[in-house]
Amino acid sequence: MQRALAEAAAAKASVLVVFGANWCADCKILDMTMQKDPTSTLVAREFKVVKVDVGRFDRNVDLASTYGVPLRSGIPAIAILFPGPRGALRNPCRRARGRPEDGDAGIHEFFRRAAVAARRGN
């Protein structure tokens, strides 16, 4: 995680931490969408991505807790880490799950809004 934060700082980007699991259908959909344009281009430009496997909610739970990610609310869940005032780490936590009818466009819009919020620092 420290490496991703350092790379993000050098690139003037934020770190996008995606908490999920390989058994989770919504996590798979999110991952597939993140790999397709236009979302892949947006994510690559705006974020350094770190994927965190939570297993059956028995792995990396402490990391999720450190960043204020409520895994009990479900996965996929995202923490966006970016430098805040005086170098403090700011962390807006967001749910990545959209409405099924929104599909790829809804996920893309989620990341577009997250990128705008991260650039503004809120």
Image (spheres, grey):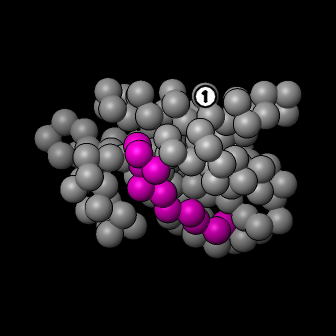
Q: Nearer the viewer, residue 113 or 78?
A: 113
Q: Is residue 121 above or below residue 91?
A: above
Which residue lies under the disc numbered 1? 109
Residue drawn 40% across the image and 43% down it: 46
Residue 5 placed where, x, y %?
A: 32, 59
Residue 99 placed where, x, y %?
A: 80, 30
Q: What span is in magenta?
A: 44-54
Does 87 sit left or right of 93 as displayed?
Answer: left
Q: Is residue 90 above or below residue 71?
A: above
Instruction: Check if residue 51 falls in the magenta segment.
Output: yes
Residue 43 placed where, x, y %?
A: 50, 46
Mark 1: which amino acid? Glu
Does 35 sit left or right of 45 as displayed?
Answer: right
Q: Nearer the viewer, residue 56 or 11?
A: 11
Q: In this view of the protein, can residue 92 be seen by the observer? A: yes
Q: In this view of the protein, can residue 72 be seen by the observer? A: no
